[in-house]
């Protein structure tokens, strides 16, 4: 069995009439799937971070539209209005991941056609989004592995693996492909406050037989100074046309540290993550989550003098990024040209 087929646990499973979502909040202690049969349930799964990772969010939303059409198509003559309302609801589930809006636009384009069987067409579109993402991940893996030739160690942040995508992963897809060619040392930051690195990334790598070393987020600079890593490899939730990239909070600080220590930074993401209409990262909306996700319980009270600032993402400027790897090709030193050159590449 090849490595790419070995991972048994998938973030999303379409059953034919429902979407099964792996509750990633419970990993690695428990493997629990929640089953949803309507768009409202999928919206909640995205908003509550049962499913997370920009590509996986887009795929889940696409299946959410399928469930909406299944629910409303034969039951009401006003089904289009009801589906449109569900799409609007899904669009509000997470603000930063552009894949969400890209996938919903794909679904709306299908629904705008005059179709004899809209359910069949909309399901085919969702399944294509899902399968195309997996294929894109494998392509990115190979392109990224080419760049990593000779690297002795890499570090990743958050989780940009099979759990965050349709399968195989973006940043972890690159690491998987590189490791298949020649084993290298892999480090993962814990990624506070949700600990996606500690709970998801090292666990996922272990499923593939790839040894991984977990570090505290605050140890990253000292790791770089030691010379143990040549590259930091991350995913992205939105990439602006000039190459600025939004990713999990803490990515920007890693990029600044990498510049100081001569470590290179790679962003691996499908072209569906690129917001072609956004000129730079200053325009990216950064999701602010509830402060209670960060505060100890003793501070969660009305008269508390302690509050929390809880941005989920930050934006790394293109000048701190060494390479952006997509399924359509690689942009080296994106500060020089941005990513617009990829737009018309098939």
Image: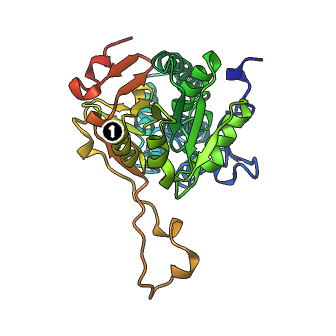
Residue 20 in which image quadrant? top right
Q: Is residue 102 left or right of residue 58?
A: left
Circle 1: element type: helix
Query: What crowding class fits label 1: few (fewer than 14 Cα within 10 Å), some (14-19), or many (20 or more)?
Result: some
Q: Is residue 132 visible?
A: yes
Image quarter hosting the N terminus: top right
Identify the residue at horizontal 32%, vertical 49% (top origin). Answer: 285
Q: Please identify the residue farthest to the front as the structure is shown.
A: 226
Q: Nearer the viewer, residue 315 or 134?
A: 315
Q: Residue at (63%, 23%) from the top-left corner?
A: 183
Dividing the picture into quadrants, the one containing residue 275 is: top left
Instruction: Identify the residue shown where x is 53% and y is 25%.
Output: 174
**How is the rendered protein coloured?**
rainbow
Left or right of 24, for residue 98: left
Q: Residue at x 53, y 16 (%)?
A: 142
Q: Which residue is mark 1?
A: 259
The percent position of residue 307, horizontal first and vertical second, equals 42, 75
Residue 80 percent location from the top left of the image: 46, 38
Q: Name, please, the residue furthest toward the top.
A: 346
Image x and y of residue 315, in percent: 33, 45
Numbered-mark total = 1
- The quadrant of the picture occupied by the C terminus is top left
């Amino acid at each position: 069995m090849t490595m790419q087929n070995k991972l048994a646990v998938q973030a999303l499973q379409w059953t034919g009439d429902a979407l099964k979502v792996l509750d990633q909040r419970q990993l690695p202690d428990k493997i629990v799937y929640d089953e949803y049969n309507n768009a409202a349930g999928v919206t909640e799964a995205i908003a509550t971070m049962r499913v997370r990772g920009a590509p996986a969010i887009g795929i889940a939303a696409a299946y959410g539209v399928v469930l909406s059409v299944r629910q409303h198509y034969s039951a009401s003559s006003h089904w289009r209005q009801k589906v449109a309302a569900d799409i609007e609801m899904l669009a509000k589930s997470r603000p930063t991941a552009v894949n969400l809006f890209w996938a919903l636009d794909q679904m709306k384009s299908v629904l705008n056609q005059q179709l004899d069987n809209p359910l069949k067409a909309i399901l085919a579109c969702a399944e294509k989004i899902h399968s195309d993402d997996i294929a894109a991940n494998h392509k990115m893996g190979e392109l990224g592995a080419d760049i990593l030739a000779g690297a002795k160690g890499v570090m990743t942040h958050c989780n940009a693996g099979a759990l965050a995508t349709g399968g195989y992963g973006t940043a972890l897809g690159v690491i998987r492909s590189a490791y298949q060619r020649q084993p290298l040392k892999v480090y993962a930051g814990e990624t506070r406050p949700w600990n996606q690195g500690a709970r998801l990334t090292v666990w996922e790598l272990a499923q593939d037989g790839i040894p991984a070393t977990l570090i505290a987020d605050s140890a990253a600079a000292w790791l770089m100074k030691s010379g143990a890593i040549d590259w930091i490899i991350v995913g992205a939730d939105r990439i602006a046309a000039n190459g600025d990239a939004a990713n999990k909070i803490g990515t920007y600080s890693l990029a600044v540290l990498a510049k100081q220590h001569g470590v290179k930074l790679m962003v691996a993401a499908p072209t569906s993550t690129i917001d072609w209409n956004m000129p730079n990262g200053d325009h990216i909306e950064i999701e602010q989550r509830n402060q209670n996700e960060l505060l100890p319980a003793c501070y969660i009270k009305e008269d508390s003098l302690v509050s929390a600032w809880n941005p989920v993402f930050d934006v790394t400027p293109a000048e701190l990024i060494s390479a952006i790897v997509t399924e359509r090709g690689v942009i080296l030193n994106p500060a020089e040209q941005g990513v617009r050159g990829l737009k018309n590449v098939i």
